[in-house]
Amino acid sequence: MSEISYYSKEGMKKLKDELDHLEHVERPRVSNDIAEARDKGDLSENAEYHAAKEEQSLLELKIAKLKGVISNARILDESKLDTSKILIHSKVRLKNIANNIEFTYTLVADSETNIKEGKLSVNSPIGKGLLGKKVGEIAEIQVPSGIMKFEIVEISR
C-alpha cells in the first residue's frame, strides 16, 4: 500500500499533465517506432526493434508508477494550514546556528522537490526534522555530515 502524498493544485496539475503527455504523445510514438522496426525484417537481429521494445517497457513502468502516485495524491487547501507549527506546504524561514545564515524553504511532496526554487522534500532528513517545530524552536537534525542546528525564524503559507 502506498502512502498518501499532499500536493498543491499546481503540483497535481503538473503530475496529470505529465501522465497525459506520456499516454498520448510518448506511447503512440514508441508504438510507431516498434511498428517501423518490425517492418525492417528479422526481429531476432533487429537492434532497433529490441531498443523500441525496451523503451516501451520502461515507458509503461513510468506510466504505472505515475498513476500510482496520482491515485494516492491529495490536494491540500493551503489556506487552511496551521502556521503555528511546520507542516507540509509550510513556508519556513530558518537560521543555521553554525553560521547565522538565513534561508527559506517550502516543504513539499517528493515529486515537487526543487532546491533551486526553495522547495524541500518533506521526506528529506531536514524536512522530517522540521515537521512539528514552532517559531523560536531549535531543530537538531541528523544529516550525513553530522548534526545541524536550525532556529525556526518564521512559518507562513
Image (cartoon, grey):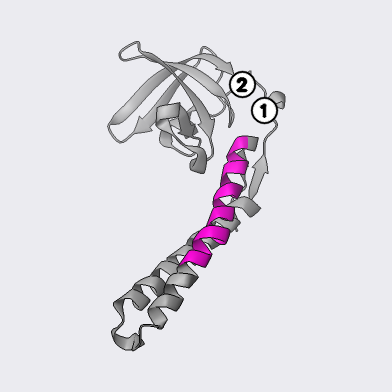
Q: Position of residue 113 (x, y in %)?
A: 47, 37
Q: Quadrant of residue 54?
A: bottom left
Q: Is residue 2 visible?
A: no
Q: Amino acid at mark 1?
A: Glu
Q: Is 23 drawn above or below residue 54 in the view shown?
A: above
Q: Earlier in the sequence, mark 1 or mark 2?
A: 1
**Is residue 21 within the magenta segment?**
yes
Give the residue drawn at x 67%, y 43%: 74
Label 1 to label 2: alpha-carbon separation: 7 Å
Is label 1 in contact with label 2 (beta carbons under 8 Å)?
A: yes
Determine whether the residue tagged by mark 2 lies in a helix, strand or loop: loop
Q: Which residue is mark 1?
A: 78
Determine whether the residue tagged by mark 1 lies in a helix, strand or loop: helix
Taken as a whole, is the magenta stretch helix, strand or loop?
A: helix
Give the residue drawn at x 63%, y 18%: 84
Q: Which residue is mark 2?
A: 157
Near mark 2 (Cα within 10 A), the count class, few <14, some 14-19 or many ≥20, is some
**Is residue 13 within the magenta segment?**
yes
Q: Tell me where the magenta segment starts and ends, as one range.
A: 10-29
Q: Quadrant of residue 10?
A: top right
